[in-house]
């Protein structure tokens, strides 16, 4: 975007933060355009800060309520003859941990199991994990790969592609297959199935070989968005070859070390690649399920900014994979 010198100040409102930052730092743009870009960045930053504060305050209230529940349950557990204090307290403690992790932004990998429901304890419960497909638009909150394996399989089998978008899904699947020779080279190097590479490429870059597989930023420079600054100077210097950057992205996520590429393992790693921000909210990720009946609404409209009413307009990876399997372009083991 920085090389597009036809950009005018009035056009900037439609651009991303990364594009605005690139324009603001590029001396080839007119001074007024650079200043307008900086002003927009400041305004967005202020809006994001206000939203973050509001979200923090909302979570703080939840944390306070949970803490009060924990104290009350602790007292109840001690007074109940023969009561199992651990069984009573564990669901609330785990929920407290999730809320704290969201407040401070720390990644956690809890082992979530079916516990007492809100009706049974008077406190928020965790959605049980099972082998049946959950209600459309929802998932369990577990991020334990073994626990959610059955859920992934059941959701994949139950998923119905939206009829009005079937042609688009078919086109995306054919496009992915057309690039197989390139993806095959990465499979030979890293052991990551060619179609998994292709699914990530479609979701992150819209199959654009001029962008990073990490997040769709331009290969002309290191990544600007999360993960920022990739590939590092130890790997290569810009402009980057697509395969060099793609190898960096896949190894950054440790995919070259994996040997299990069964259906649930694939779906877990695809969701993990994008992040578990939807799952911790009990929402089916559009990164996997958009364009099917498994996804309804809810979307991160920017890094760390979640809009529960927004609807994704991008086809999900699991939906493309289902079409690949249906057309026999991919045979899952």
Image (cartoon, helix red, strand yellow):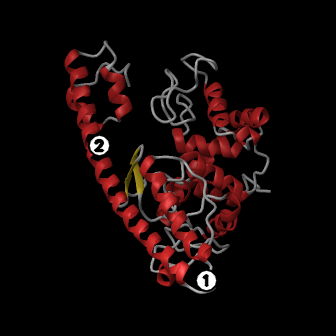
Q: Is mark 1 on a helix, strand or loop?
A: loop
**Left or right side of 38 for 178:** right
Query: Relative to 259, is 244 on the left or the right?
Result: left
In the rendered image, the vertical position of residue 128 relative to residue 226, given as above or below: below
Residue name at image x 30 percent, y 43 percent: 48
Instruction: From the top left corner, tell me how far across and down residue 88 is, in percent.
Output: 56, 76
User: Which residue matches tag 1?
Assistant: 83
Residue 86 location (% of width, % of height): 61, 72
The 10 Å Cα crowd at callout 2, few under 14, some 14 to 19, many 20 or more, is few
Q: Examine the image and state in which quarter residue 256 appears.
A: top right
Residue under pointer 2: 49
For disc 1, the neighbor class at 10 Å (few under 14, some 14 to 19, many from 20) is: few
Could you say which is closer to the camera, residue 315 or residue 147? 147
- Residue at the (71%, 58%) spot, across then down: 263
**Residue sitting at x 69%, y 37%:** 183
Q: Residue furthest top?
A: 27
- Which mark is nearer the camera, 2 or 1? 1
């Amino acid at each position: 975007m920085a090389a597009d010198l036809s950009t005018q100040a009035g056009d900037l409102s439609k651009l991303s933060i990364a594009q605005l930052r690139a324009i603001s730092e590029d001396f080839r743009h007119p001074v007024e355009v650079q200043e307008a870009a900086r002003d927009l960045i400041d305004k967005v930053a202020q809006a994001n800060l206000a939203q973050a504060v509001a979200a923090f305050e909302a979570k703080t209230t939840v944390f306070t309520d949970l803490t009060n529940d924990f104290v009350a349950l602790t007292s109840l557990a001690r007074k109940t003859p023969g009561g199992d204090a651990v069984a009573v307290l564990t669901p609330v403690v785990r929920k407290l941990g999730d809320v704290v992790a969201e407040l401070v932004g720390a990644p956690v990998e809890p082992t979530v199991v079916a516990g007492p429901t809100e009706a049974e304890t008077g406190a928020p419960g965790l959605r049980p994990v099972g082998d049946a497909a959950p209600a459309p638009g929802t998932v369990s909150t577990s991020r334990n790969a073994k626990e959610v394996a059955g859920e992934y399989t059941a959701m994949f089998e139950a998923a119905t592609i939206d009829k009005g978008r079937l042609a688009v899904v078919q086109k995306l699947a054919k496009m992915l297959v057309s690039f197989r020779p390139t993806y095959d080279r990465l499979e030979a190097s890293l052991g990551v199935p060619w179609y998994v590479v292709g699914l990530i490429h479609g979701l992150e870059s819209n199959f654009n070989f001029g962008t990073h597989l990490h997040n769709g930023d331009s290969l002309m420079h290191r990544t600007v968005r999360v993960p920022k600054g990739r590939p590092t100077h130890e790997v290569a210097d810009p402009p980057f070859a697509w395969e060099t950057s793609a190898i960096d992205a896949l190894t950054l996520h440790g995919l070259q070390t994996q040997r299990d590429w069964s259906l649930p393992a694939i779906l877990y790693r695809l969701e993990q690649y994008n992040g578990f921000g939807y799952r911790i909210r009990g929402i089916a990720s559009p990164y996997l399920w958009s364009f099917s009946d498994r996804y309804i609404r809810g979307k991160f409209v920017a890094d760390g900014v979640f809009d529960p009413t927004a609807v994704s307009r991008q086809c999900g990876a699991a939906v493309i994979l289902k079409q690949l399997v249906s057309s026999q372009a991919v045979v899952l083991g």
